[in-house]
Image (cartoon, rainbow, N blue to C red):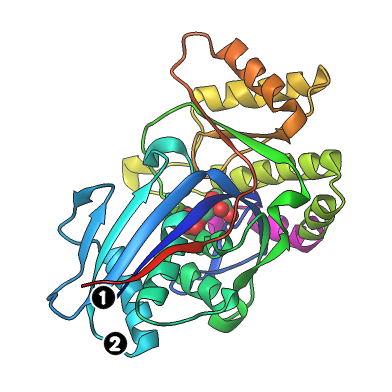
Amino acid sequence: MLRATAVAHSNLAFVKYWGKVDHTLNIPTNNSISMTLSDAKTTTTVEFDASLAADEIEIGGVMTSGDARISKHLDRIRAMAGSDLFAHVQTRNTFPSSAGFASSASGFAALSLAGASAIGLTLPDKELSMLARQGSGSACRSIHAGFVEWLHGSSHETSYAVQVAPPEHWDLVDIAVVVSAEAKEISSSTGHKLAENSLFWSERLRGMPALVDTVRGAILNRDFETFGRHMEAEALSMHAVALTSPHGNGNAWKSGIYYWAPDTLLLMTAVQNWRADNLPVYFTLDAGPTVHLITTSGHAAGVIAAVEHIQQEKDWRIFVSRPAPGAHIIKNEDSR
Ligand code: PMV
């Protein structure tokens, strides 16, 4: 029996994936571009075992009574290998789940690689990315190192991520400021579904191909100003769609999704002032209140000092990430 341990890092989208054409296969409406993050890592061990009557899943050192999303993903791996063996799974993150990093991205990338390897499949990166995508859309980007683009495609076979540039290409730094540990009210899966109800939805998609070209080109040319301006505006475009996606019924009706906390806005305006003071930094925001401040390594200390200056007594946490490696096996062993 083979036991395989894989590591994968989460990723941060500079051009966001928001909305799907297929909610089961996770086929997105647009290409997205991300950076794989060094400070947000998942380590997962998978071992298939003929003596098991069900999957045994341990998350962060705690044995669960089962995890439907993980077992469903193992089913995909079992189907690919023609196996009906259940598995032991142990998975652990280096970052708290409330930190505003997509733990499902690193989680499903690590589970895909460890699971495929443990069952004896050697999958090329394209197929690993297609597999990870079915667990969680953004996980398909965490298969690759550095700067990554997810080609939206129109079917399972045509929707996968590719590397745009390796980690050493550009010394970008993501300073993630976690301003609230509260769980979000609307999951990203629900947000993806509600997006098409926004009156700005089609407008966002209309400009998307040109925007993706611009951001990819700015990364390849290491053009920080073009990159930063388009990335920051793009995050606000995604949030404009979310803010205008009505949901709920009766008295629980809401006109849109607010992923922000008050301190999110405080930081967003601060960033604009810091730039006016010649600190080269831009922000982006995922579906949560954490503000990701993007700068180059030479200015990271200056940005952290600026955050600490306005933080005062507030209970914020800061995570600093650089471009990271893609998903990789750290241990393959014959067990028992
Ligand atoms: O993969 P999901 O369903 O967690 O969606 C991710 C959505 C965003 O983080 C907001 C954008 C992205 O491209 O990662």
Q: Is residue 33 above or below residue 289?
A: below
Q: Nearer the viewer, mark 2 or mark 1?
A: 1
Q: Which residues are magenta?
A: 195-211
Q: Residues within 10 Å of mark 2 (few under 14, many from 20)?
A: few
Q: Residue at x 74, y 24 (%)?
A: 272
Residue 55 is situated, as x and y percent measured from the top left of the image, at 20, 69
Tell me which corner region of the image, top left, top right, bottom left or bottom right, holds residue 32: bottom right
In the figure, is residue 51 to the left or right of 11?
A: left
Label 2 beta carbon less than 8 Å to ligand 1 = no
Q: Amino acid at mark 1?
A: Phe
User: Which mark sits nearer the N-terminus, 2 or 1?
Assistant: 1
Note whether residue 44 is visible: yes
Q: Which residue is nearer to you in this view: 88 or 271?
A: 88
Q: Is residue 208 magenta?
A: yes
Rounded to the nearest angstrom, the CA distance separating label 2 from label 1 is 10 Å
Q: Is residue 336 above or below residue 103?
A: below
Q: Tell me the SS state at disc 2.
A: loop
Q: Which quarter of the rendered picture does the N terminus lie within?
A: bottom left
In the figure, is residue 12 to the left or right of 133?
A: right
| Main SS category, magenta section | helix
Numbered label attached to residue 48: 1
Q: Amino acid at mark 2?
A: Ser
Q: Tell me the SS state at disc 1.
A: strand
Tell me which corner region of the image, top left, top right, bottom left or bottom right, holds residue 84: bottom left
Q: Which residue is mark 2?
A: 83
Q: Exactly how many numbered labels are in the figure?
A: 2
Residues marked 2 and 1 touching at CB (< 8 Å) = yes
